[in-house]
């Protein structure tokens, strides 16, 4: 039963997600996964547990006293201009951290990096008149195109890039710590375009007759991705505030492309492309601890995305670069009882600027959330709502409103507690 459950989580991480960003590059960039941090202005570094552990900062992993298992899930509700409302739910993170000593730990897990899930269907037939076909077709060749035609097409895409990572965390001195992560980037995207052609004619009674001319035609494009990356993360605590910064870089992206075309016959073609650009990211965060129960945080992040050839991107548009700002707060209530030990009320705001080749997109909104800590603060249930709007002056972008709900479960066990006490 456990193996079956983990398999479902694995497949859900490999295949989530629909939003307006799914139409570009390799899909939407997913770089926040922890509900407690998302609740504080869609941040990454803060929104942590009582001991200072946070899922997006490897330098803090050693602070967890027990083996920790964490998973995150997202429910997205998107309203995209000129398109139908989209609702999706998917797992976003699987994570396991194991203490090695009082000052060191090892962790590993998996999460999506880029993801797309698109289905576009034409509601009505597109008609082509005989006068349009005449200049395009030589009727003397006897191929049967002597009348108007109509067609209906569909397009679907799913997949993206996922990240399998291993992290080492260690305390350095009394108030500093470092974390190093190594990641394997992998994944598959599959595009399929279908079109069916029908010839039209009229009977003596002037009734329209539709005759299949060419059905089950499709073009399939399958891309397999591979790369690797590393991250360096540093954190330091002072009397009243905490600082965290990190930097990551990847090897050039590689893509194996397989195309299959099926009209009157099936044609296969395979190509391999390398040196398709690196992905770089970095950021820093500041948290001010006003009291033992109230804190404020601010963060800045940037991402320079992979830049494959245009024909390897969704609709030939490149992945965007990203700059983001986050502001948040956390208010903790200590009220130990039979049900929980403490509560965290979190809220914040964010602004993200996405830069494409020919236009920019502004993504802004607010967040709010709740964390319930129980069993001596070792476990927690974390909830977050993120409400925002994405807009651009470009006609190539459909403005979007969204409301996302995130859930993260953190559960600890003392499987390796003997090692921790050494």
Image: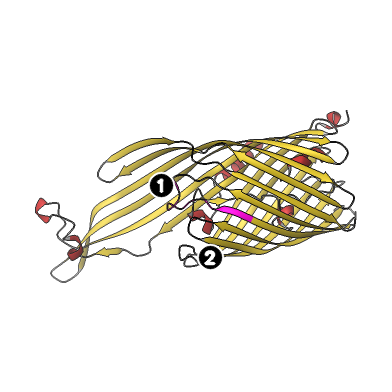
Quadrant of the drawing holding the N terminus: top right
Residues 93 and 229: in front is: 229
Q: Position of residue 171 (x, y in %)?
A: 82, 36
Does 321 appear in magenta? yes
Query: Residue drawn 32% across and 53% down?
Result: 195
Q: Position of residue 193 (x, y in %)?
A: 37, 51
Looking at the image, residue 317 sits to the left or right of residue 56; the answer is: left
Per the image, the residue denoted by label 1 is 311
| Label 2 close to label 1 by CB (< 8 Å) | no
Query: Residue drawn 37% across and 41% down?
Result: 259
Region rendered in magenta:
311-323
Q: Which numbered tag is attached to residue 392?
A: 2
Dot placed on the residue nearer the N-terminal end, 2 or 1: 1
* Residue 206 visible in image: yes
Residues 130 and 296: in front is: 296
Quadrant of the drawing holding the C terminus: top right
Tell me the SS state at disc 1.
helix
Mark 1, residues whose alpha carbon is within 10 Å: few (<14), some, or many (≥20)? few
Looking at the image, residue 391 sits to the left or right of residue 343; the answer is: left
Q: Is residue 175 above or below residue 322?
A: above
Q: Is residue 11 above or below residue 285?
A: above
User: What is the distance, in whole Å, between disc 2 and disc 1 at their CAs?
Assistant: 24 Å
Query: Residue drawn 39% across and 36% down?
Result: 271
Tell me the SS state at disc 2.
loop
Query: Residue drawn 49% across and 53% down?
Result: 24
Q: Position of residue 373 (x, y in %)?
A: 82, 51
Looking at the image, residue 187 sits to the left or right of residue 71; the answer is: left
Mark 2, residues whose alpha carbon is within 10 Å: few (<14), some, or many (≥20)? some
């Amino acid at each position: 039963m456990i193996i079956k459950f983990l398999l479902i989580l694995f497949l859900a991480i490999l295949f989530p997600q629909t939003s307006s960003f799914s139409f570009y590059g390799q899909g939407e960039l997913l770089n926040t996964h922890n509900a407690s941090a998302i609740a504080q202005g869609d941040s990454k570094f803060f929104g942590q547990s009582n001991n200072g552990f946070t899922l997006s900062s490897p330098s803090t992993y050693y602070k967890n006293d027990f083996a920790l298992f964490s998973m995150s899930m997202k429910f997205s509700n998107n309203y995209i201009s000129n398109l139908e409302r989209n609702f999706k739910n998917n797992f976003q993170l699987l994570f396991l951290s194991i203490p090695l000593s009082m000052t060191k730990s090892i962790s590993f897990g998996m999460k999506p990096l880029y993801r797309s899930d698109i289905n576009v269907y034409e509601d009505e037939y597109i008609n082509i008149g005989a006068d349009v076909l005449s200049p395009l077709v030589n009727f003397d060749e006897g191929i049967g195109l002597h009348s108007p035609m109509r067609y209906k097409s569909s397009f679907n895409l799913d997949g993206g890039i996922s990240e399998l990572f291993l992290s080492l965390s260690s305390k350095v001195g009394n108030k500093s710590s470092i974390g190093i992560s190594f990641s394997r980037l992998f994944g598959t995207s599959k595009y399929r375009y279908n079109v069916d052609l029908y010839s039209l004619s009229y009977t003596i009674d002037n009734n329209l007759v539709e005759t299949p001319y060419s059905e089950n035609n499709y073009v399939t494009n399958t891309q397999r991705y591979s790369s690797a990356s590393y991250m360096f993360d540093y954190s330091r605590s002072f009397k009243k505030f905490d600082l965290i910064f990190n930097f990551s870089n990847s090897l050039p992206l590689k893509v194996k492309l397989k195309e299959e075309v099926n009209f009157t016959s099936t044609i296969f073609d395979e190509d391999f492309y390398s040196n398709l650009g690196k992905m770089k990211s970095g950021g820093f965060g500041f948290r001010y601890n006003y009291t033992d129960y109230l804190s404020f945080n601010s963060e800045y992040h940037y991402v320079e995305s992979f830049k494959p050839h245009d024909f390897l991107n969704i609709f030939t548009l490149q992945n965007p670069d990203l700059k983001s700002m986050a502001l948040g707060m956390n208010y903790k209530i200590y009220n130990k009882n039979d049900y929980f030990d403490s509560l965290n009320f979190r809220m914040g705001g964010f602004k993200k600027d996405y830069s494409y080749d020919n236009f920019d997109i502004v993504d802004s909104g607010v967040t709010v959330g709740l964390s319930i800590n129980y069993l001596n603060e070792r476990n927690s249930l974390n909830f977050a709502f993120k409400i925002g709007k994405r807009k651009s002056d470009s006609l190539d972008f459909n403005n979007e409103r969204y409301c996302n709900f995130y859930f993260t479960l953190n559960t600890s066990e003392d499987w390796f507690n003997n090692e921790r006490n050494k």
